[in-house]
Image: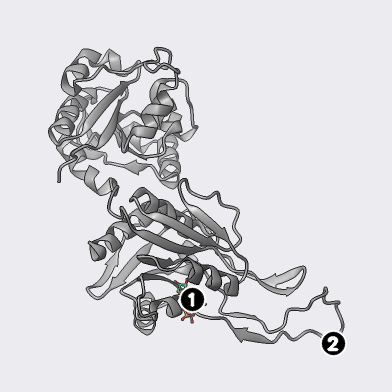
Amino acid sequence: MSLANKKIILGVTGGIAAYKAAELCRLLVKAGAEVRVVMTAAAQQFVAPLTFQALSGKPVLASLWEAASGDGMEHIHLSRDADLLLVAPASADFLARLVHGRADDLLSTLCLARTCTLAVAPAMNREMWAAAPTQRNLAQLRADGVQLLGPAVGEQACGETGLGRMLEPAEVVAALPGLLGAGLLAGKRVLITAGPTFEAIDPVRGLTNRSSGKMGYAVAQAAREAGAEVCLVSGPTCLAVPAGVRRIDVQSAAEMRDAVLRELPSDVFIAVAAVADYRVDAAAPQKIKKSDAGLTLNLVANPDILAEVAALPNAPFCVGFAAETERLAEHAEAKRRRKHLPLLVGNLAQDTLGQDTAELVLFDDRGAHPLPRADKLTQARHLIRHLASFLN
Ligand code: CTP
């Protein structure tokens, strides 16, 4: 696939693999991308900026202090315009600086100020790669939603052989279209539910569950990145609303249902919320006082929002989530059929609840599609690409 008109910032950090970045730059331009190269000071010890200027056809940016735009906000403008920030090679030092959110040169500042996907292609000696601090940093970067490309196993500049070599430029280029989901849902309205619901018992108590809302918010961000107009109906969470997403706050399942029905029609409905199956029949208007006699709550069933939307005559493309604690495939597939869903995302609740990473399986008419364990935003992007294939 071509990268036509994609705006890519290619960050080059200091390592011998910087020579591969020259070939990478050439391949990106050949694939149609508009490439701006940003080099760290160390990178310039390995390859001259002029090489990248010639290959990209644009001046190389290297300093936070030589602002090219009138207002001196080059780091903000550059990162706002970009579809992708790709750091290749990414040295061990640069990964460590990313983890800490450093902003003491142009490239690290761009990474911090970005709104687009950040992908890094690490390159380092195998011992540096295997070192505990590097591995800790990688785990944090994955959790932060940074996309890791490679490294590969092979002969290294230091004469050793092992894991740490930068992917070949062609391999890096081949991985990019998958990261650039942009435009896949352009012009589509996507309605998403997220988080837990809260069912009042009395004015100070209620029934809720352990959903953090992280998955639903990640799905909202991924749908927005793919160009959709996104409305997120959210139960109580402490998460920030993703950029460009409209959020409607609700408490109970009944409020969530009403908000969803009001927001229809939409092209896609993704029910990620952990909706309480039951509510207290009549919540007490005043605080319930304790008594030795115990307390019995009368629970009544809540409406099934997803089933109701999926049964509408002009139903959107409906996606359900199923958190199971055992026999995932069997329960998830049964749920998908019962609610008449074209697509259902299954996970084992104990592996996912409150975690930053998730292991998901997509179930559709074609069968089960397991996704590799990754941070929730990466999983959400996979889901959006998968569902977009049904729409287009
Ligand atoms: N859902 C919903 N409204 C409800 C309950 C669930 O929209 N009242 C949606 C969830 O957002 C999720 C899917 O339905 O997408 C999950 O269904 P779930 O409640 O787990 O299924 P149940 O049929 O209630 O099965 P279980 O017995 O496992 O609770």
Residue 291: name its quadrant.
bottom right
- Residue at 62 percent across and 86 percent down: it is 300
Q: Nearer the viewer, mark 2 or mark 1?
A: 1
Residue 373 placed where, x, y %? 36, 57
Residue pointed to by mark 1: 305
Q: Is mark 1 within 8 Å of ligand 1?
A: yes
Q: Residues within 10 Å of mark 2 (few under 14, many from 20)?
A: few
Q: Amino acid at mark 2?
A: Ala
Residue 295 placed where, x, y %? 78, 84
Is residue 12 shown to the viewer in this render? yes
Residue 185 placed where, x, y %? 31, 55
Q: Image quadrant for the C terminus?
A: bottom left
Return the mark for residue 293.
2
Q: Is residue 54 depicted above or below 30 in this figure?
A: above
Residue 205 placed where, x, y %? 74, 70
Q: Earlier in the sequence, mark 2 or mark 1?
A: 2
SS at mark 1 in the image: helix
Residue 161 is left or right of residue 260, and the answer is left
Is residue 14 shown to the viewer in this render? no
**Foreground: 38 or 256?**
256
SS at mark 2 in the image: loop
Rounded to the nearest angstrom, the CA distance separating label 2 from label 1 is: 36 Å
Q: Amino acid at mark 1?
A: Ile
